[in-house]
């Protein structure tokens, strides 16, 4: 659970693709670029990809697949409890 006024470590951007797929990236994490035809699979890959790149446990909130045509969404990522 997020502490009051806790600052996120980074922001991940979610973009729906024209073909219905999902693209995920972060300007703060070079190398984090996920894209696929199946949005839920891409969402499921965010946490392991970030933990591999960053070498630490993270608290990645569960979010529903964004609807097609929705503007880009920002997903805020926090350090896992005890990893601050």
Image: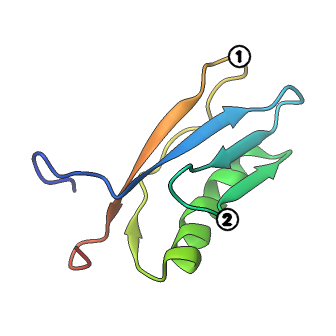
Residue located 62% across and 62% down the image = 30
Q: Judge the density around disc 1: few (<14), some (14-19), many (≥20) Cα neighbours within 10 Å.
A: few
Q: Position of residue 62 (x, y in %)?
A: 46, 50
Front residue of 59/28: it is 28
Residue located 53% across and 31% down the image = 73
Q: Judge the density around disc 2: few (<14), some (14-19), many (≥20) Cα neighbours within 10 Å.
A: few
Q: How is the image coloured?
A: rainbow
What is the C-alpha distance between the residues marked 1 and 2? 26 Å
In the displayed structure image, the side of residue 6 where residue 48 appears, left or right: right
SS class, disc 1:
loop
Image disc number at residue 24: none
- The residue that label 2 is drawn on is 31
- The residue that label 1 is drawn on is 69
In the displayed structure image, the side of residue 62 where residue 27 appears, left or right: right
Q: Position of residue 13 (x, y in %)?
A: 57, 41
Residue located 57% across and 79% down the image = 52
SS class, disc 2:
loop
Front residue of 53/69: it is 53
């Amino acid at each position: 659970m997020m502490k009051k006024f806790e600052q996120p470590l980074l922001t991940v951007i979610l973009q729906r693709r024209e073909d219905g797929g999902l693209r995920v990236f972060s300007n703060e994490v070079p190398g984090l670029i996920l894209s696929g035809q199946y949005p839920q699979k891409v969402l499921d890959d965010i946490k392991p990809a970030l933990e591999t790149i960053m070498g630490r446990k993270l608290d990645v909130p569960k979010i529903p697949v964004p609807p097609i045509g929705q503007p880009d969404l920002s997903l805020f990522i926090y350090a896992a409890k005890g990893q601050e």
